[in-house]
């Protein structure tokens, strides 16, 4: 939430307004969110959607609370559930994993030497297998200092644990074939997911060797391209340790998504996917970004590149990906 800024309205602005109007919180709590102990699991930036976000706060338990809050929200923002948690619960600190998805047109994986028509390209089985082989390389604990900004190779916080990462079967929407990549990890740094995907695209397209993934975890500064922000979705936030300790204690419910799965699927089909597809067709963010891959030097370190080309401009112009789970 951008307190004091009327220029950029956020989802949290709408949520707090709905909480006040529905009588769930007093007006002064809306002005000072610390008074209601408000915290969100993860932050989503411009162009990034959320299908399964959780916020924690103190509210008055009024009758028909979900219906009344939703009545004061725009249709593209929905409250799906409300659960009582332990005292002092902080949704960000108690969250032990997050799952993101990234929806992209499959022509992103076409080899650079092939002339690609956006609407006719179809991803073959062999290429999908290669994509998944490369995505699986990210599993485990690695030093991702090259996949974010302002972190050096010796910074302990650059080490992150990835539980799974894979690309699902392609599907066609509006004549264009798309696929969805899913990644689950303990936490993510700014730009990390988009750079992980950007590097795999560069390898599959033939711009970079597969060995660059291992090299990027070393101490040298490697030029890692950042895929567009469009298509990135916060899918789920996970509370596995909390659920194990408190989920069946008779006082609290586990923080799970089973009851909301169907609603989330409908919401994505109604709001998130159409926005991604239509924006891609109109703005061609992926196609425009793909044209910048040839500018990157995947064989040299960033230090060498800067020394050899002091006047070069940075092509990494897409902005932040909103996955900075560490930031306050």
Image (cartoon, rainbow, N blue to C red):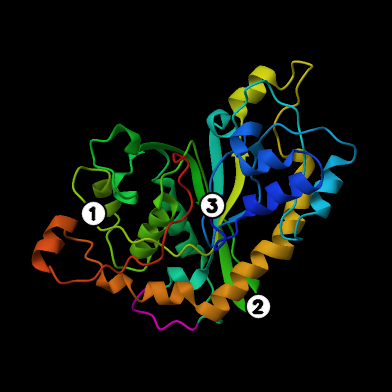
The local secondary structure at tag 2 comes to loop
Q: CA distance from mark 1 to mark 3?
A: 34 Å
Instruction: Look at the numbered discs 1 and 2 and tell me whether their residues touch, using CB distance below 8 Å.
Output: no
Residue 111 is left or right of residue 179, and the answer is left
In the image, residue 215 lies at what x, y percent? 24, 48
Q: Residue furthest left?
A: 307
Instruction: Look at the numbered discs 2 and 3 and tell me whether their residues touch, using CB distance below 8 Å.
Output: no
Relative depth, front residue between 167 and 298 = 298
**Label placed on residue 174:** 2
Total marks placed? 3
Relative depth, front residue between 310 and 295 = 310
**Label placed on residue 222:** 1
In the image, residue 306 lies at what x, y percent? 14, 62
Q: Residues within 10 Å of mark 1 (few under 14, many from 20)?
A: many
Relative depth, front residue between 206 and 99 = 99
Q: Which residue is mark 3?
A: 2
Q: CA distance from mark 1 to mark 2?
A: 37 Å
Residue 72 is left or right of residue 242, and the answer is right
Comes first in the chain, label 1 or label 3: 3
For the question of whether residue 283 can be seen, the reply is: yes
Q: Can you tell which quarter of the image residue 23 is in?
A: top right
Instruction: Look at the numbered discs 1 and 3 and tell me whether their residues touch, using CB distance below 8 Å.
Output: no
Give the label, 2 or 3, closer to the camera: 3
Q: Can you tell which quarter of the image residue 122 is in?
A: bottom right
Residue 257 is left or right of residue 10, and the answer is right
Q: Residues within 10 Å of mark 3 (few under 14, many from 20)?
A: few
Q: Can you tell which quarter of the image residue 226 is in?
A: bottom left
Q: Is 57 situated above or below 301?
A: above
């Amino acid at each position: 939430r951008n307190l004091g800024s009327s220029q950029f309205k956020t989802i949290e602005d709408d949520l707090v307004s709905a909480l006040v109007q529905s009588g769930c919180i007093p007006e002064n709590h809306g002005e000072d969110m610390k008074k209601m102990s408000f915290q969100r699991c993860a932050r989503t930036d411009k162009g990034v959607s959320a299908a399964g976000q959780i916020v924690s706060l103190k509210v008055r338990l009024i009758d028909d609370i979900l219906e009344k809050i939703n009545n004061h929200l725009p249709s593209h923002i929905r409250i799906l559930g409300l659960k009582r948690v332990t005292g002092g619960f902080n949704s960000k600190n108690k969250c032990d994993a997050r799952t993101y998805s990234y929806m992209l047109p499959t022509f992103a994986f076409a080899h650079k030497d092939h002339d690609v028509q956006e609407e006719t390209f179809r991803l073959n089985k062999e290429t999908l297998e290669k994509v998944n082989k490369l995505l699986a390389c990210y599993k485990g604990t690695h030093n991702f200092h090259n996949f974010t900004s302002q972190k050096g190779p010796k910074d302990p916080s650059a080490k992150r644990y990835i539980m799974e990462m894979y690309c699902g079967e392609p599907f066609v929407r509006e004549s264009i074939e798309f696929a969805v990549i899913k990644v689950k990890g303990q936490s993510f740094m700014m730009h990390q997911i988009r750079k992980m995907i950007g590097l795999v695209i560069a390898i599959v397209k033939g711009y970079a060797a597969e060995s660059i993934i291992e090299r990027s975890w070393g101490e040298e500064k490697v030029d890692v391209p950042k895929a567009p922000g469009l298509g990135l979705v916060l899918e789920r936030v996970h509370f596995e340790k909390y659920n194990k300790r408190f989920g069946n204690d008779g006082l609290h419910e586990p923080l799970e998504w089973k009851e909301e799965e169907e609603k989330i699927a409908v919401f994505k089909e109604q709001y998130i996917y159409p926005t991604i597809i239509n924006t891609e067709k109109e703005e061609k963010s992926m196609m425009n970004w793909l044209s910048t891959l040839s500018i990157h030097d995947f064989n040299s370190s960033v230090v060498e590149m800067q020394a050899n080309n002091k006047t070069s401009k940075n092509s990494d112009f897409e902005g932040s990906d909103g996955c900075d789970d560490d930031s306050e």
